[in-house]
Amino acid sequence: MLASILVSTVQRVLLVGPDDAARRSLHLMLDRGGKQVVAVTELEAAQRYLETADCDAVIAPGELAPQLAGGRSPPVIAIVSSRDPAVALALLDGGVHDVVSEPIDELAIVLALRRAGTRVRTATVSPANGTRADKREIIGAGEGMQELREVIARVAGHRTTVLIAGESGTGKELVARAIHDASPRSSHRFIAINCAAIPATLLEAELFGHTKGAFTDAVRDRVGLFEEAHGGTLFLDEVGEIPLPLQAKLLRALQEGEIRRVGDTDAISIDVRVIAATLRDLAAEVTAGRFREDLYYRLNVVPVTIPPLRERPEDIPLLARFFAARHGAHHQRASIQLSDDAIEALSHQPWPGNVRELENIIERAIVLADGPTIDLAFLETVMNVRAAPPATDTGQLELSIKKGTRDLEEGLIKRALVVTQGNRTNAAKLLEISHRALLYKMKEYGIT
């Protein structure tokens, strides 16, 4: 069950604590859910890891969790043996994001990671200069991206809502951040939530907060994302997934500038700019009765459409070199370069996953490269990017593909295991296959 429901923006988890049966069970649980897990036993090792590497959430024993929380730390989930509410409240007051009691229940971990996923993308502001410390660029010199920058510049100074449309992987959140960064609200918080990643029963409390006792497990008052984003921007990704009953409450928040926490009768005034994004055709959803017409028009004041990568091939060389420089620096492989023939091949791919797919491929190439240059031959072998194939005998080609596919898979698996120092979970992620599929192939090829 866990493999199918442990889905959130949290992908990389730092697991802290003694190497005992409970932690091994939790590690296995996260592995089955497809998470990249880094496990350490000591507090100092965890602190060093957080100083030099990125992760989306930390899971630690209650006695260590407060020392890992705070500042720019990712959300920390504390594991406690006590079910005393006072223990949980003390940890939450100490900066811990969530508390899970032993024995660990799979659903409790699923929900804790989902809740953590709503916070991992909150922007940070540097007090020195008022700019975002993790600002990312909108790359592209073509006509489509120039028009997009002009729209961002025009709408940034106004409070009006913006509805961003575009295929998966085109960078809808990046555009929303750019609007926020160019606005008078840039010194306040930018908070993003993927509405599709939160169960419908929990989404209302995530957005609007709740009072103590409003429902089971509501052990304290909790501020929602609208309140957290006061003075700033709230980005509602996949807004088309919000259930109809909750759409009415969202509409009121947009129209009246006030919210009510779950379980409360008092209204709270808010000053929040809302930017929404969707993969769905919301006009069609309105016609089908799945989305409120009045909310659609309230969100769609300024529509922004991001063109897919296949419609702007002139931007691919810029993006590819940008991602190569970024990930080369991140992985301490800054000297690796993309050859001209590799760039040319990348420019002629369909990229159904858009910019996100291109970035993932470049990062994989950087990590797996064993030389100073990523050339076309390397992309053909490792990344399954193809130039036009030469004419050849069909029968011989089929035989060479069968043999070559087996050799290719075996070589890639061995290289991925070397790169990840034998960590099968991370190797499976790098190879873009499931953990189970990796184990099966390792057994098939006799890899230990």
Image (cartoon, helix red, strand yellow):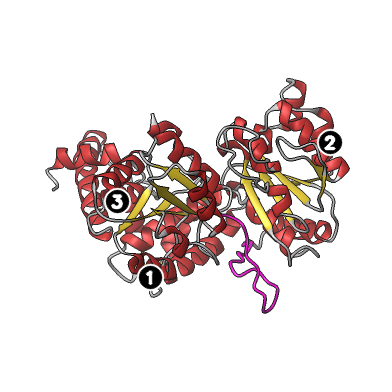
Q: Label for residue 48?
A: 1
Vertical relation: 363 (above or below) 218: below
Query: Which of the two discs, 1 and 3, sits closer to the camera?
Result: 1
The residue under the point 48% across, 47% down is 99
Vertical relation: 431 (above or below) 441: below
Instruction: Name the amino acid, label 1.
Output: Arg
Cβ atoms at labels 3 and 2 below 8 Å apart: no
Query: Residue 266, can we see it?
Result: yes
Task: Residue 73: say if magenta.
Answer: no
Query: Which of the two discs, 2 and 1, sits closer to the camera?
Result: 1
Q: SS of the residue at dot 3?
A: helix
Q: CA distance from mark 1 to mark 3?
A: 23 Å
Between 142 and 166, the one lying in front of the other is: 166
Q: Is residue 381 left or right of residue 115?
A: left
Between 350 and 261, the one lying in front of the other is: 261
Task: Residue 129: say if magenta.
Answer: yes
Q: Quadrant of residue 438?
A: top left
Ranked by sequence position, the earlier of labels 3 and 2 is 2
- Residue 219: horizontal and vertical position, in percent? 58, 41
Q: Is residue 304 left or right of residue 280?
A: right
Residue, far right: 256
Q: Label for residue 297?
A: 2
- Residue 70: horizontal and vertical position, in percent? 53, 64
Ranked by sequence position, the earlier of labels 1 and 3 is 1
Q: Which residues are magenta?
A: 120-139
- Residue 208: horizontal and vertical position, in percent? 71, 42
Q: Residues within 10 Å of mark 1 (few under 14, many from 20)?
A: few
Q: CA distance from mark 2 to mark 1?
A: 49 Å
Vertical relation: 150 (above or below) 247: below
The residue under the point 70% across, 32% down is 281
Q: Label for residue 427?
A: 3
